[in-house]
Amino acid sequence: MGERFHLPAVASTLLPVALCILTLLPHSILGRPAEEENAGSSALLQRVKRGWVWNQFFVLEEYTGLEPLYIGKLHSDMDKGDGSIKYILSGEGAGTTFTIDDSTGDIHALQRLDREVKSQYLLRAQARNRLTDRPLEPESQFIVKIQDINDNEPRFLDGPYQATVPEMSNIGTSVIQLTATDADDPTYGNSARVVYSIVEGQPYFSVDAKTGVVRVSLADMDRETRENYTVVIQAKDMGGQLGGLAGTTTVNVALGDINDNPPMFDQRLYQMSIPEAAPVGSVVGRIWAKDRDIGLNAEMVYSIIDGDGRDQFDISTDPTNLFGIITVKKPLNFEGKPSYTLKVEGANTHLDPSLRHRGPFKDVTIVHVSVEDVDEPPQFESPEYYVELSEDAEIGTLVKTISARDPDAANNTVRYSIDKSSDPEKFFYVELTTGSLMTVRSLDREEIGWHNITVLAMEMNNPTKISSVSVAVRVLDVNDNPPTLTHYLEAYVCENAKAGQLVQTVTAVDPDEPLGGQRFYYSLAPEAANNPNFTLRDNQDNTAWILTRRGGWSHQDQTVFYLPIFISDGEQPVQSSTSTLTVRVCSCDHDGNVLSCTAEAYILPASLSRGALIAILACIFVLLVMILLMLSLRTHRKKPFLCDEEENVHENIVRYDDEGGGEEDTEAFDIAAMWNPREAHHHPGKMRQDMLPEIESLSRYVPQACVMGGGDSSVHGYVLAKLLDADMDACAPPYDSLQTYAYEGEGSVAESLSSLQSGTSNTDHEYDYLNDWGPRFKKLAEMYGVLETNTPQMW
């Protein structure tokens, strides 16, 4: 089949001849002629004559032959068979998937074609002159379509599946819908027509063959009997016919719970016990009404519906809403009631109205609670005591009788005492056997207004059982304190004050606290009733004014006046006191401010300026600096300094360039200088000429009177002279640093210590005698290796 062209009349007779040239193989199917080109391209076709165009080729997928698959043949009416025409193929897959014989125009498929990968290919063909490579005809475009074969089985893309359906569901209840996909062409044959069937899961479930909906096929399936089911569904193409391909998937179906089972207690009678001393809220025990359902359908609520203990105990549900917790509601007493019986009901909280015919969804059980006897501490008649006691109560007054008893059946004897920490000053005493609380010291409300006492009660037979009670004792006030003046015990009056001028307003204070409030009465003491200088006016508001009775005051005449004031209260018994007010006469300005007054201490704080305060502080600072300077000078005066900085304060060091021969070396040092220093200075020729000492001897200034006589008295005189010299010379070292050395030589018991003649003998000396000199010479003995030791040698 060729495309129709608009050709001249002469050439139209050659069209049948050109169509007959086409050779078709059995594998190829020619396409229908193409439609005429649009008007815009007809002009181009009229200029170039094209004798062929292929529109479509069809080829089956999944060719498995060894040779390339022949698809079709292209031939131009201009091809004379002499090889002058070359066929060119381009487009999708040209050269890789498809190839063309450029001489014959045969098209072959080089690769295995899969419609599910690519269903069609768009190619272009053209005939060119082999020598000039010029196109002989315009390019022609055609399509190679891949025909489908049934080579793909149906697949469940989301499997395996999970599904849930309520238990006891009716037959036909939908569980899940499955969909299988087939990659084959649904428009060609039955390759993609899928049919569903159930392979495993009968008789509980079924599947719709067309829609793939899985449904319940067995009624009254019970989750408590079996909860999980495995269903295998098959999808087969070709409409389920023989030879079709199939795929399977698994559906795990779980039965959902509904409240179809009533709760049941596993016991019809529970036995529990609780000590009588257990506090309120203590857990007695727990019960459980088991429910075969789960989740919300198994949640319970418990209540005590009857029994003699419904007011003594309470029941609640634990956080899991499964168990009932029985607790103590009121204090227990074994002696009062040793046991209780409770009737407890447990019911489901979530009910399904459609399943009420399976009810009732509740159950009842009996709980017997035994109260265990416990040796309890004594119990007081009252949880606390309050007592009021007058502060003038005599010693031994009975405050209150505290009573306690043993609540146990034994009713042991009780002994009483006071907790020492509650009454550290021991104002009270409690009688050991009767519990009578009495005073042992006088009370004073003004010192301690409340006494909080702790009374202890202990069993006689079991001292570990102790209880306590608080006794609050309020001390009532008695008018036993007189009023006194407050704050101002001194006042001043100006010299220019006139008669009737206010000097001071006085108030009083009373530590007592009468019920009707304080009321004070003021007057001058009887001895000052006719005082010519001052008068007192009671203001009837617990205050009084001190007024001048005259004018013409002068502190030169009298500087101080003493005014006794009599104060009394209004309670019975009446208490009174006399306080003295000191009034000083001062010079004041026109505004009444004090200028000068003999009571300097009184007026100084009021008139002290900032400049005066700074001046006082500066004087104090200068005084402190002078004191510190004097102390420092005194300290330096007690510590004389050395005139020569290089002089050693401990001893005089005389350096020689050669070693002397001890006291026999008369040329190195003249011992006569020690015995008679004065003569040593008169014979300078005896000093050695080969060296000079760096520091002169301390013996250069020895008084002549101190070196008279000989022997020890001369040495003693020399020392005294040096002491006197040191005391008189501020530059001399202190006396306590004077070093005294004994000379050595042939007359010494230790003999000569000089090493000058030690070279005459090369033999080792024996130093064993150092061990006999005691622990003070132990270090010396160790240095000379004569210490007896078991320590092995280190070298």
Image (tube, rainbow, N blue to C red):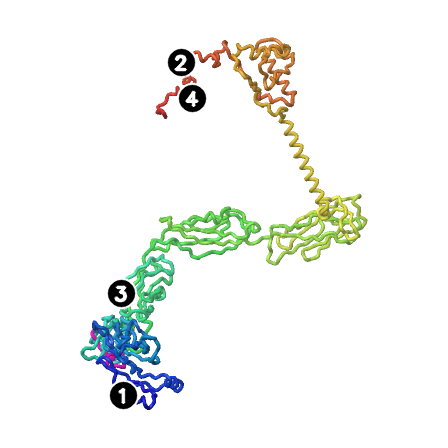
Residues drawn in magenta: 185-199
* Residue displayed at 60% across by 53% down: 512
* Residue on which disc 3 sits: 269
Please provide percent x and percent y for residue 596. 77, 46
Quadrant location, the C terminus: top left
Please provide percent x and percent y for residue 620. 69, 40
The CA span between labels 1 and 2 is 152 Å
Nearer the viewer's eye, disc 2 or disc 3?
A: 2
Q: Amino acid at mark 3?
A: Leu
Q: Identify the mark at residue 783; answer none if there is no mark.
A: 4
**First reached walking from the N terminus: tag 3 or tag 4:** 3
Nearer the viewer's eye, disc 1 or disc 4?
A: 1
Q: Are marks 3 and 1 in contact (CB under 8 Å)?
A: no
**First reached walking from the N terminus: tag 1 or tag 4:** 1
Q: Amino acid at mark 2?
A: Thr
The CA span between labels 2 and 3 is 115 Å
Asked if residue 104 lies left or right of residue 560, the reply is left
Q: In the current view of this chain or complex, which residue is farthest to the bottom?
A: 9
Q: Amino acid at mark 4?
A: Met
Q: Nearer the viewer, residue 139 or 397?
A: 139
Q: Amino acid at mark 1?
A: Pro
* Residue on which disc 2 sits: 763
* Residue on which disc 1 sits: 16
**First reached walking from the N terminus: tag 4 or tag 2:** 2
Residue 533 on the magenta span: no
The CA span between labels 1 and 4 is 143 Å
**Secondary structure, magenta segment, majority class:** loop
The crowd level at tag 2 (other Cα within 10 Å; few <14, some 14-19, many 20+) is few
Disc 2 is placed on an element classified as loop
Nearer the viewer's eye, disc 3 or disc 4?
A: 4
